[in-house]
Amino acid sequence: MRYQGKIQNWKDDKGFGFIKPNGGGNQVFVHIKSFLNRQRRPVGDELVTYELKVDAKGRAQAENVAFVGERAPSNTSTERSNTALIFASAFIVFVSVSTLVGKLPFAVLWLYLFGSTVTFLVYAFDKSAAMNDRWRTKEDTLHLFALVGGWPGALAAQNLLRHKSKKRSFQIGFWFTVVLNCSALAWLFSPSGSEVLRALLSSE
């Protein structure tokens, strides 16, 4: 059964708010991940329809939330998510192959694998903190993890966990760190970068 109500007390930085039912009664908790259209974020006072469910603590929560008068969302968001995951996986495969053929030292592959794992966990922690109103990880810290090699893990977290994937200012900063990191990796394949690598490896 679907109900109708109005978005109230929306906190966009935390990704949640409440719905005031049209027929009266207690407000219903709603999280950004419960919206059918992931390309549009609420700002407050929008009319929505929703289904009700009860969470593990017995609290009413909205799911399958749709904005009134809006067409059903397309598959564009899903397609972008798949593309991002393929890109991150292909990059890790590229670094792995480059390591196996001797173009890169094993330390570079380890940096990307370890960094991506840690970054994914940091994103998961931050998402949990946002949902439970706890201490948040600073965006600059998330960007730093991405810059030093954790961006494949960050990209996976953004799309699998639906965290920090829609905030435009954050995405601009994130992709800037990806470009910087990939530029540094490309330099390692250049003659000067190769000389530095050989010098580092010979000194070990």
Image (cartoon, rainbow, N blue to C red):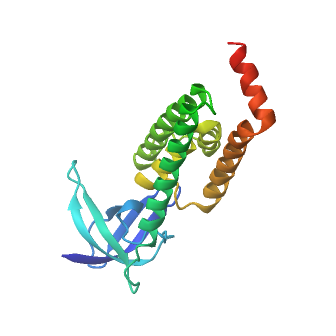
Spot the residue most to the bottom: 69
Tell me where residue 111 appears, x and y as whole percent. Answer: 57, 30
x 51%, y 60%: residue: 12
Vertical position of residue 170 compared to residue 73: above or below: above
Find residue 24 and report its image quarter: bottom left
x 42%, y 59%: residue: 16
Tell me where residue 199 appears, x and y as whole percent. Answer: 76, 20
The residue nearer to you, when weighing 201 against 82, is 201
Q: Is residue 87 visible?
A: yes
Q: Name the quadrant of the N terminus.
A: bottom left
Vertical position of residue 140 compared to residue 103: above or below: below
x 38%, y 60%: residue: 33
Tell me where residue 204 appears, x and y as whole percent. Answer: 67, 12
Vertical position of residue 130 compared to residue 16: above or below: above
Spot the residue most to the right: 192
The residue nearer to you, when weighing 134 against 158, is 158
